[in-house]
Amino acid sequence: MAFLGVAGVAGQAGVGLGFKVLPLVFAKMPAGDFFGGAFFFMLFLAAITSSISMLQPGIAFVEEALGVGRKVSVTLLGLLTCFGAGFVIYFTGDLKALDTLDFWVGTFLIFMLATIQIIVFGWVWGIDRGFDELHQGAAIQVPWIFRPVIKWICPAFLLGIFALWFMQEILGMDLSSGAAGGVSYYVTDLFGEKASLPAQLSVGLVIVIAVFFSLMTSRARAFQRAEQGLDKDDV
């Protein structure tokens, strides 16, 4: 704000702040080329290291779900990663594809998965059964206070946050004044007259990958059950 003023940074957050506003800041500050290059180099290192750690659960999931080795799992996820990166680079104009994927996957889906998991753990699976499983082979017992936190407090907070987000971003309600507000551009990019093709393709890509992994998992489980049945018949 010291370099661009309020108008220069208004409405910018996340990807827009890092790749639109900060380059302008570096361009206006002394030795901006040096500090800008150093910043984006460190940002690159942070992205690479965090991506490696983020891929590890996916590698383990593919190994277990498909019953394949680590090399096959890494190759499969590597191809998907290269395809996704190429998709983002191709639709790099205005960072629309990257911004859309960052929101719907990095923000919305993470929140929804956390909400579903906490409800399944606390209510569907059962808090007592969940804690019994959690304590098997554990050297430290989880304090009892986390039982009501997991069963009552966390679901209430998460569902409340989702309800407020839905009213404000989807229904376009201005909760501070009670008047009608604007619908989030993440939604209008997908539907309506202002729909954006890169945004629609980005969400479609996420859905296709999710369906693909779901089908692979179901087929792998069916194959494993069939193998177990054959083993029992042989015995």
Image: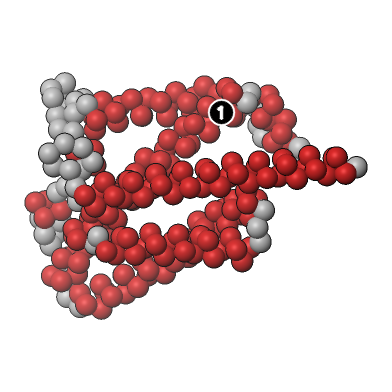
> Coloring scheme of the render?
secondary structure
Tell me the quarter of the picture where residue 120 sits. top right
Tell me the quarter of the picture where residue 16 sits. bottom left
> Which residue is at a point 37% across and 69% down the rendered structure image?
44
Front residue of 72 and 118 = 72
| 186 w.r.t. 198: above or below | above
Relative placement, left or right, of 120 versus 202 is right
> Which residue is at a point 15% across and 71% down the rendered structure image?
27
Does residue 25 appear in the picture of this structure? yes
| 54 w.r.t. 208: above or below | below
Report x, y in % for residue 191: 21, 37
Q: Neighbour class for label 1 at 10 Å: few (<14), some, many (≥20)? A: some
Report x, y in % for residue 117: 53, 33
Does residue 19 appear in the picture of this structure? no
> Which residue is at a point 15% across and 33% down the rendered structure image?
182
Report x, y in % for residue 77: 51, 60
Front residue of 146 and 76 = 76
| 74 w.r.t. 33: above or below | above
> Which residue is at a point 56% across and 47% down the rendered structure image?
216
What amino acid is labelled 1 in the image? Answer: Val
| 229 w.r.t. 119: above or below | below
Q: What element carries label 1?
A: helix
* Quadrant in the picture for the N terminus: bottom left
Q: Which residue in the structure is indicated by mark 1? A: 120
Tally the marks.
1
Relative placement, left or right, of 36 versus 68 is left
Report x, y in % for residue 7: 9, 51
Relative placement, left or right, of 89 versus 185 is right
Tell me the quarter of the picture where residue 235 sits. top right
